[in-house]
Image (cartoon, rainbow, N blue to C red):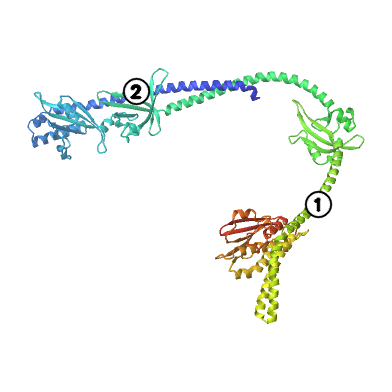
């Protein structure tokens, strides 16, 4: 099935499914909410009826107590004996009626008798004059008052009735009923709340810990059902959502609330959505199936017509193609060959038809990959071949290079294979000519590269000579002063010889030797700068060269109190170069480090080696004053130096950078006050090069 062909129908079915699912889901939700609302109304009516029934069972008690002759006598003439007798009467009545407490108050609100007189004697000291139930009885009404729960005591309902004798008010009979006892007679399967002015009076188990209504219900929303009635959806502090229904009892001032969880509604709604989606999927599949069957009938007719036209076109294309084409059966026998293939192999249709395709390939080439490919014709292990180079065999016994391709052509009843043959004799001839031209060109490039390399070396040497010419004036200035001093010291030595002052003569000769050493240093740098690198490099041990240079500087380090941190190295590595230039690198780096440590307290020179995969690194670090960022930028330029005039030509770092580049290495510097480090990286020689 082609999906783009069914895309409009699929989109239409999807749209209808979505609309149908939404409508069914809304209808089922409305039906479930209506049912839940009716269930809540029944629960609400049942709870209110039970509450009023429970209260009605106790409302007669205050009046019954007020009609007692003993109570009237106590209020007319109070005495301890009468109070004890009435208290025992109230105690028995309280046990029979299963109330919380019974007590009798005089006209001033002071207790005269109490059902719990045995355990709570302090009750007689409490005045009830300001209580609502007492005030209601004084007005001649049958009082009812609710005491809200507090941290010390639970909530309670107080019922009161006035005590009259010949229309004279003597006192008040009062019954106390704890809300817990009142709640015990209510339905336990419902979730309900009794509240008054946002204070909870009674609640079912899930809400008993709350004191305020706002602690239980955090959000409310009203929605309208299909029948026009409103329904309130509340969200509890615990995260539950459900239908909340509330009724106010005007005579008691209580709000009775019933809560029914929405989980059942959501379950019914989810099931309805799933069933609707499943139904829509089934309907859609049936529609697609019918549509597919219809399209298949149409497509089959079109395919048969197109197949007939295609076979005719293919026959024309094969006959007129500029490449050889051969049709094989599953056994590899030739069924058809086009004119181009006949021309390539020098055969005719009657002669070649029915022979094995392997006979058209040179036997030496046929054995191997080609034989394995053709042996798998008609099996599942067959894999098509594209542009495989092989050698074809003509009918006269000659051969020619060709590109051989074969792929399977599946038809309804049989399996055929199409072989494509391209004669590449001309291309092979051109490839040989091109390969010969490339070899000649590569040889010319190598010759030109060698000539350019020699010219580059000559230019570098010429540039060094030009640099020597530019610095001649500086060298003359540097050598002029030592030469003048030499002439002066020689004249003085002659005078001292005439006077036979040998001690002063030795001092002057030492000065002459120092001047000659200074001139030697200057000329040695010039000689090294002008030195032309050798043509052939040999393996050199950098550790051995470094140890030799360190031994040269040990005397100076001990004389200038420079601490050397170098434990030696057991690295067995070799780099491409020569010992002279490698030692020149270390001489310059260690000498510059010693110069930077002159006058530094706690001078320390650190030398370390580390081996990497293809290179070795040598680090020379000192704790001198460091090099500024501006000087670092031109540190390796010829004739740049930070030393005073006469102490250096500025060629040392330029020389070693040139040497390191010739050795295909790298040098880096990092410096800050108190630490300067030069890092030299040289490539290792492979075992084959050594």
Instruction: Identify whether 102 is placed above or below 300.
Output: below
| Residue positioned most to the left | 77
Horizontal and vertical percent for residue 256?
31, 26
Considering the image in quadrants, where does the N terminus appear? top right
Horizontal and vertical percent for residue 548?
68, 67
For label 2, count other residues whose C-alpha is less than 10 Å away and answer few (under 14), some (14-19) or many (20+): few
Q: Is residue 158 left or right of residue 585?
A: left
Residue that appears at 76% across and 31% down: 408
Considering the image in quadrants, where does the C terminus appear? bottom right
Describe the element under mark 2 as helix, strand or loop: helix
Q: Which residue is mark 1?
A: 450
Q: Quadrant of residue 344?
A: top right
Residue 541 visible in rendering: no
Instruction: Identify whether 283 is placed above or below 333.
Output: above
Residue that appears at 63% across and 69% down: 556
Q: Quadrant of residue 97?
A: top left
| Residue positioned most to the top | 227
Residue 278 visible in rendering: yes
Residue that appears at 67% across and 74% down: 510
Q: Tell me the distance, in whole angstroms, between the alpha carbons under discs 1 and 2.
A: 108 Å
Q: Which residue is mark 2?
A: 42
Instruction: Judge depth for marks 1 and 2 and give the one in front.
Output: 1
| Residue positioned most to the right | 396
Q: Quadrant of residue 395?
A: top right
- Between 216 and 557, the residue placed more toward the observer is 557
Instruction: Identify whether 373 is placed above or below 457.
Output: above
Q: Contact (CB < 8 A) between labels 1 and 2?
A: no
């Amino acid at each position: 099935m082609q999906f783009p062909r069914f895309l409009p129908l699929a989109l239409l079915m999807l749209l209808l499914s979505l609309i149908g699912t939404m409508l069914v889901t809304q209808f089922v939700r409305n039906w479930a909410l209506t049912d839940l609302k009716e269930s809540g109304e029944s629960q609400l009516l049942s709870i209110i009826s039970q509450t009023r029934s429970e209260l009605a069972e106790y409302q007669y008690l205050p009046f019954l107590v007020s009609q007692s002759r003993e109570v009237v006598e106590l209020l007319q003439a109070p005495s301890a004996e009468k109070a004890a007798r009435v208290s025992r009467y109230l105690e028995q009545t309280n046990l029979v009626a299963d109330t919380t407490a019974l007590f009798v108050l005089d006209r001033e609100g002071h207790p005269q008798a109490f059902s719990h007189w045995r355990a709570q004697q302090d009750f007689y000291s409490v005045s009830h004059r300001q209580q609502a139930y007492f005030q209601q009885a004084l007005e001649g009404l049958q009082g009812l008052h609710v005491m809200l729960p507090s941290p010390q005591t639970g909530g309670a309902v107080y019922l009161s009735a006035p005590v009259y004798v010949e229309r004279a008010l003597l006192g008040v009979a009062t019954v106390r009923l704890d809300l817990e006892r009142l709640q015990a007679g209510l339905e336990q399967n419902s979730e309900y709340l009794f509240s008054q002015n946002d204070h909870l009076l009674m609640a079912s188990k899930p809400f008993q810990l709350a004191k305020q209504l706002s602690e239980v219900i955090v959000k409310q929303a009203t929605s309208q059902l299909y029948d026009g009635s409103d329904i309130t959806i509340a969200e509890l502090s615990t995260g539950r959502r459900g239908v909340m229904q509330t009724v106010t009892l005007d005579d008691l001032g209580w709000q009775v609330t019933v809560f029914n969880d929405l989980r059942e509604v959501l379950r019914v709604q989810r099931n309805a959505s799933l069933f609707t989606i499943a139904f829509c999927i089934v309907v859609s599949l049936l529609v697609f199936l019918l549509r597919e069957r219809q399209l298949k009938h149409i497509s089959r007719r079109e395919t048969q017509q197109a197949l007939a036209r295609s076979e005719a076109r293919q026959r024309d294309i094969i006959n007129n193609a500029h490449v050889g084409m051969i049709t094989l059966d599953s056994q590899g026998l030739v069924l058809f060959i086009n004119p181009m293939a006949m021309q390539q192999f020098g055969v005719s249709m009657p002669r070649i038809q029915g022979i094995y395709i392997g006979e058209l390939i040179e036997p030496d080439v046929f054995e191997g990959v080609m034989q394995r490919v053709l042996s798998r014709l008609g099996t599942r292990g067959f894999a098509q071949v594209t542009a495989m180079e092989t050698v074809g065999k003509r009918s006269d016994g000659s051969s020619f290079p060709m590109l051989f391709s074969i792929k399977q052509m599946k038809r309804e009843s049989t399996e055929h294979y199409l072989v494509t043959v391209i004669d590449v004799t001309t291309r092979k001839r051109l490839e040989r000519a091109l390969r010969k031209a490339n070899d000649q060109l590569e040889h010319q490039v190598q010759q030109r590269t060698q000539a350019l390399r020699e010219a580059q070396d000559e230019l570098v040497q010429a540039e060094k000579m030009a640099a020597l010419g530019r610095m001649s004036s500086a060298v003359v200035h540097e050598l002029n002063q030592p030469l003048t001093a030499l002439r002066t010291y020689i004249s003085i030595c002659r005078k001292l010889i005439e006077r036979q002052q040998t001690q002063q003569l030795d001092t002057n000769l030492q000065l002459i030797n120092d001047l000659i050493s200074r001139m030697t240093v200057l000329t040695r740098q010039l000689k090294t700068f002008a030195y032309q690198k050798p043509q052939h490099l040999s393996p050199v041990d950098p550790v051995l060269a470094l140890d030799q240079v360190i031994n040269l500087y040990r005397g100076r380090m001990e004389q200038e109190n420079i601490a050397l941190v170098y434990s030696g190295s057991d690295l067995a590595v070799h780099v491409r170069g020569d010992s002279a230039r490698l030692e020149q690198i270390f001489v310059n780096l260690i000498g510059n480090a010693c110069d930077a440590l002159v006058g530094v307290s706690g001078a320390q020179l650190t030398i370390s080696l580390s081996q990497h995969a293809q290179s070795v690194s040598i680090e020379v670090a000192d704790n001198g004053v460091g090099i500024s960022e501006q000087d670092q930028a031109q540190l390796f330029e010829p004739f740049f130096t930070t030393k005073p005039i006469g102490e250096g030509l500025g060629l040392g770092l330029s020389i070693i950078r040139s040497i390191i580049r010739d050795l295909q290495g790298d040098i880096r510097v990092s410096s800050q006050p108190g630490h300067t480090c030069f890092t030299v990286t040289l490539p290792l020689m492979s075992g084959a090069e050594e």
